Amino acid sequence: MKHDPHAAMFSQLRESLLAHLLNSVVPFWLKHAIDAEGGLNTCIRDDGSIVSRDKWLWSQWRAVWVFSRLYRRIGQRPEWLDLATNIYKFAARHGWDAQARGWRLRLAHDGSELAGCDSIYVDGFAIYGLTEYAAATGDKAALALARRTAEGVIEKLGQPHDKIKMWPYPAPAGCRVHGLAMIFSLVLWELGRACGEQRYLDAAEAMSDEIFGKFYRPSRGLLLERIADDGRELPAPLGTAVVPGHVIEDMWFQIHIARDRGDNGRIMQACDIIRRHIEAGWDHSYGGLLLAIDADGSDDIGWDFADTKLWWPQTEAMYALLLAYEHCRQEWCVQWFQKVHDYCFAHYPVTPHGEWRQKLDRFGKPFESTVALPVKDPFHLPRALIYCIDVLDRLV
């Protein structure tokens, strides 16, 4: 194998990211967030103090994925699997609504319902967490529950998007939204591979094709968050909103799928789309990826908090850039990775407590307004670190 010119840097980077994961990020959750009655407290401040013991299942299933994946890929520490099992049992015991064929959005600390099946995205994270938990444990009941969830999802996805409950991002009338194809292409693909169900793989491929064939607009080089039901572009600003971090995250999802399929052409296309959205979304005045931009360059952007610097687009970009480099070996990947990495570690870590702050304004100052859910959950950051370590292992 040809020696990579960045091998020494990659080796050092692997060790620093692993240390950050194990010494700062994971301990925050083990120390502050475990609820004795079950589940994980994710309505939590940066210093680890608990705001509320409400359990948003969106976050609970994400945490099941993370602690299962830590156990499976980083090291078989019993406390990680014990926590994944604790959260899984709490969510499975209290969260499923058999009549609605989906997962409740929010539970009280005792498991009683506070909000019902108001978001299909919770179902997506349930499939994701259950599939990973089953991979870590061999638990057949977890895989069966993932399949039961998938059957409900496939039925729901047969409706127009504006008829599907998808809080906190409801589809405007007559729209299809990128977020559904994005998450369900990944989770149905992973479930299909785990259980050998071709229907799930076919559904995932169809959504992947929709992402590249409809939401991505080659003439713009940009991927739109909303299109009309018939695939046409919608008027601005609703139809011209671009969320660079969302696209970058989706493109590494699509690289995973294309890698499994042996589709190198699609991998290269995804790499190009990552580059385009990093370049389009980067704030050249103050650094960091902006949450949203307008495809036509307008200042009237059809997305809330557009000029903020949330943590998750940055973490998704770090992994996507390393993954893109693994496949295309082009220098822009490394250059942009270093730029994103340096911005992240200069702005987000909360050094005394571990973990990261999640919300910065355009100028890099923390703010308190709720964006999407009122939670801080262990997902985007630990997942990105786990996957960065994986790809660095392969590169080194």
Image (cartoon, helix red, strand yellow):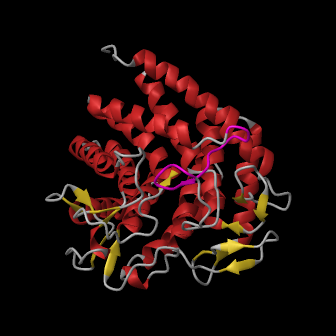
Queried whether the magenta region covers residue 353, the answer comes back as yes
Which residue appears at 57% of the width and 26% of the height?
16
Predominant SS of the magenta segment: loop
Q: Is residue 320 visible?
A: yes
Determine the image quadrant of residue 115.
bottom right
Q: Is residue 329 visible?
A: no
Judge by depth and name the residue closer to the eye, 109 or 12.
12
Query: In the shown orientation, is residue 358 left or right of residue 87?
Result: left
Q: Quadrant of the C terminus?
A: top left
Query: How far across and how far down the image is residue 195, in percent?
Result: 50, 54
Which residue appears at 79% of the width and 55% of the height?
49
Give the residue furthest to the right: 36
Query: In the shown orientation, is residue 172 left or right of residue 111?
Result: left
Q: 99 above or below 13?
A: below
Q: 232 above or below 273?
A: below
Query: How far across and how far down the image is residue 266, in percent?
Result: 24, 47
Query: How far across and how far down the image is residue 228, in percent?
Result: 26, 78
Which residue appears at 47% of the width and 58% of the height?
308
Judge by depth and name the residue closer to the eye, 66 or 177.
177
Give the residue furthest to the left: 219
Residue range in magenta is 351-365
Q: How many marks?
A: 0
Judge by depth and name the residue closer to the eye, 158 or 255.
255
Query: In the shown orientation, is residue 51 left or right of residue 277?
Result: right
Which residue appears at 79% of the width and 49% of the height?
32
Q: Quadrant of the N terminus?
A: top left
